[in-house]
Image (tube, rainbow, N blue to C red):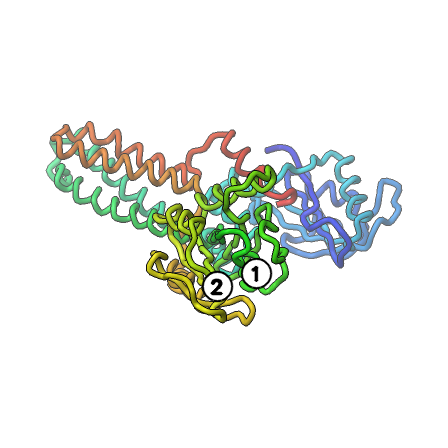
Amino acid sequence: METTICAIATALGVGAISIIRISGPQAISVVNSFFMGKDLTKVKSHTINYGHFIDENKKVIDEVLISVMKAPRTFTKEDVVEINCHGGIAVTNKILEILLSSGCELAQPGEFTKRAYLNGRIDLVEAEAISDMIYSQTEAARALAIGQITGGLSANINYIRNQLSDILANIEVNIDYPEYNDIPVITTEKIRNQLKAIKVELNQLLTDSQNGRLIREGITITLIGKPNVGKSSLLNALIQKEKAIVTDVAGTTRDLVEASIVLSGIKINFIDTAGIRKTKDKIEQIGIEKSLKAIKEADMIILILNNNEKIEAEDQDLLNLIKQKNKIIFINKSDLEKKIELSRAEGEYIFGNTIKDNGLNALKQKIIDTFNLGQINQQDPNYVSNIRQISLIKLALKSINNCLTEINDNLPIDMLTIEIKNAFDLLGEVIGKTYTEELLDKLFSKFCVGK
C-alpha cells in the first residue's frame, strides 16, 4: 500500500482533545512539513513531541502534541503519526484539510484496521472484535471483544486447523513414501478417532456461540397481551423510566416501543407491543402485525394476564400462539381480587403488580436463570460471536461429518483428504487466512472512519 491515509480518530465535536491519525510511507514527512518544533524525521520512534501545527504560510493553526511511531512496530505496521490538537471542530477540520491538500488521502471507514489485517498485524477475528469493542454496551460485551482482540478465539481455531493439517500431512506422507519404515502408519481408524475429537471441539464452539451471541447482541424479550393489560406499565417498571405512554384507553400503544436494561452483565432488550386483538382500525392493525413479527423473532416472551380477570378468548389465543416459545407468564394486578383461572395458563407464571413493583425482582431472576446469565458472565468469554464465523464453523463441521461417513463407507484414504482440506480452508476463512476483496469491503465498511 503506497498511499498515505489520514482521518479524524475522535468524535467530531467540542472537547478537550481531538486526534488526527495518519498512516503510510509519507506520514512522518508530510506532518513534519507543517510542524514547528523538532525534526520529526529524526526523532525516536514512539515519542511524543511538543510544538505547533502551521499552514503553508507558516501561520500557527494550533498548539499540538505529535506522536511518532515508526514501522513495523505500529497498529498498521506502517509509519503512523497521531496529531493531538485542541478539540474544536474548526481546528480539527483545518488540520485535516491541510493534510489532504498535501497528498494524503482521506481514509475509508475501517481502513486503518484493514491495513493492520492485510499487513499481518491482526487476523480477521481480531479485526471484527475491534469493531465489537467500540460498540460494546456492557461489561460482558467488552470482555468478549477483548478476549478476541488478544487472540483467544483465534488460538482455538488455529489449534483445530493444526490438527487437520497434521492429518493431511500424515496421509500425504504415507501415500508418497510408503517404503519408509520410520513413518507412523496412518489408518482410517486413527483418522476416525482424530476427526471425532475435532468434531467435539467444533460442536463445543457452536454450543458456546449461543453465549457469544447473547453477550454481543443481548437478549430480546417481547411483552405481549391483550389491550390495556399493563404491558407498557410493566416495561416502564422494568427499566424504571417512563418510556411507554400509559393510559386507561385500550389500544394506546400502536407501534413497538423498545428499551433495555443490563442483567448480570448482559443487555436485555424489551419490546412493548401493541395489544393483540381483532380490530378494524388500520393503524392498529399495522401495530398488531409488527407485534406478531416481534413474537416470532424474540428470544423470550412475557405474556401479561390480569389477576382480577378471567382468561378470555383473546388471552387464550395468545397462549396458543406462544405454546412452543420460551415464555414467562406475568400475572399483573396481584393486589386486586383473584379471578384468573391458572389451570388454563400453561407455563411458569409470576404474580406481581406495577404499582408497588411487586414481582419484578422475581421476574428478572427468572430471566437470569432461564438463560444462565450468571454462568455466562463467569466463564472465559472466548466465544464465537457473529454469523459469519458461526456459518463457516458449521460448514467445517459438515465436512468433518462427511469425512466420517466416507470412512464408514470404506472410501480410500486419499479420497478423505478432500473433505478434511475443505474443513481446514473454511476454518482459515474464519480467521482470514483466505479472503475475498468483497468480504473485506463489506466487513470494514461497518467501522467508523479513523479506526
| Sequence order check, earlier mark of 2 and 1 | 1
Residues under labels 2 and 1: Cα distance?
10 Å
Q: CB of mark 2 within 8 Å of CB of mark 1?
A: yes
Residue 381 against residue 281 in the figure, above or below: below
Question: In the rendered view, does 162 fall on the left or right side of 435?
Answer: left
Residue 432 against residue 206 in the figure, above or below: above
| Quarter of the figure with residue 6 | top right
Question: In the rendered view, does 370 fall on the left or right side of 438?
Answer: left
| Residue assigned mark 2 | 332
Q: Is residue 111 visible?
A: no
> Which residue is nearer to you in this view: 179 or 97?
97
Question: In the rendered view, does 371 fall on the left or right side of 100?
Answer: left
Q: What's under tag 2, amino acid-wise?
A: Asn
**Residue appearing at x 64%, y 38% in the figure:** 25
Residue 233: give its label: 1
Q: What's under tag 1, amino acid-wise?
A: Ser
- x then y, percent, for residue 257: 58, 50
- x then y, percent, for residue 16: 76, 59
**Residue appearing at x 74%, y 44% in the figure:** 31
**Residue appearing at x 32%, y 42% in the figure:** 161
- x then y, percent, for residue 44: 65, 53
**Residue appearing at x 80%, y 52% in the figure:** 88
